Image (tube, rainbow, N blue to C red):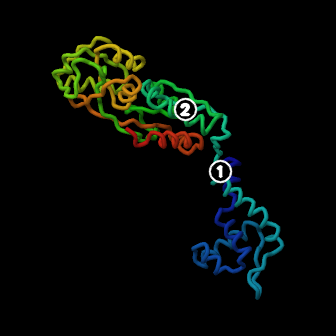
Amino acid sequence: MDNSAASLADLPDLKLLQLFDLLYDVRNVSRVAEQLGQSQPTISIWLGRLRDYVRDPLFIRTPGGMAPTPQADALIGPCREILESLRRFTAWEIAFDPATAQRRFRICMTDASHITLLPRLLAHVRAQAPGVRLEAARIDGNTERTLESGEADLAIGYVPWLSGGIYQQQLYEQDWVCLANRHHPRIRTRFGVKQYCAEGHVAVTAGTGAQLLQQALTRERIERQVVLELPGFLGLGAIVQTTDLITTLPRHIGETLAQANDLAVRACPFPVEGFAVRQHWHARYHHEAGNRWLRGVVSQLFGGSR
């Protein structure tokens, strides 16, 4: 055993320090046993160990109770300092005050979230935490590593491949809709699979959600007439607004683009598996005050919304 291990073994048990602290005030072994939830013989054994450790009787029986010795009077101050330090240690937390914090938060998200979530999140953060800087990053194969390392604070989206060590909280569920020009000559309220197949489409090819759509098309044996493929949602609203092309996409981004570009929203005419948008963070930062604040803001703004 090395010297450090030996010195740790020589330290008194915490329960002996708690006994000394309480007995110094109470001066009665029976009452101390009751307050500590122990039997009187157990308290007597603990007191014997403490006496052996400091080589002093510490307390002497008198008609008025257990009177402390001069050694006890000298030791009670250091004992209480140790106990208070331990209390501060267990309650320690680096404070995070959004009103005064100067910090950058990096959030991994899809380009759909840039459109649907980021503007509202940014407005809230600027109002509540003017010194906080936000950075949006991509969700990709490095996302799990960046959450673990602390390079990224959160990942928001549909990321089912994130594995162990990652906490998650569901924000909202997604189903699927179709968007069309509000004045489209052929897209009316009744919109079925036959009409869907007859129209030209803009296909968004990136993201796990696009895989769910493709699986549904394959399952239903539907072949779209794809006129344009896009890697993301940038420009999609303007394209649908100025053409007779339609597009199929998750409801949250669909309704956001429809509102911004005056588009018609139609229910998808065939079943597509829905999914949940969640926020994800690594277990290392589960109790970190700043991360907790940011997660709380995201949950407050988007939890339970469609």
Q: Nearer the viewer, mark 2 or mark 1?
A: 2
Residue 11 against residue 71 in the figure, above or below:
above
Q: Is residue 204 left or right of residue 64?
A: left
| Amino acid tagged 2 | Leu
Residue 51 drawn at (x, y percent):
73, 71
Viewer-proximal residue among 78 and 278: 278
Q: Which mark is residue 244?
A: none
Q: Which sits in the foreground, 10 or 120?
A: 120
- Observer-nearest of 71 and 209: 209
* Secondary structure state at the residue bearing disc 2: helix
**Counting residues from the N terminus, which is met first, the one under dot 2 or under dot 1?**
1
Q: Is residue 38 above or below residue 247?
A: below
Look at the image and tell me in which quarter the C terminus lies: top left
| Image side of residue 287 versus residue 188, left or right | right
| Residues packed near mark 2 inside 10 Å, few (<14), some (14 to 19) or many (20 plus) | some
Q: Residue at x 45, y 33 (%)?
A: 156
Specify the quadrant of the image occupied by residue 173: top left
Query: Residue at image x 68%, y 62%?
Result: 12
Q: Could you tell me residue 168's position as x and y percent?
A: 44, 40
Residue 92, disc: 1
Residue count near mark 1 (Cα–Cα under 10 Å), binned few <14, some 14–19, many ≥20: few
Name the quadrant containing residue 115: top left
For this orientation, the residue located farthest to the bottom is 63
Describe residue 14's horizontal placement relative to residue 285 as left or right.
Answer: right
Indicate the position of residue 94 as horizontal and vertical percent values. 65, 45
Residue indicated by mark 2: 122
Q: Secondary structure at mark 1?
A: loop
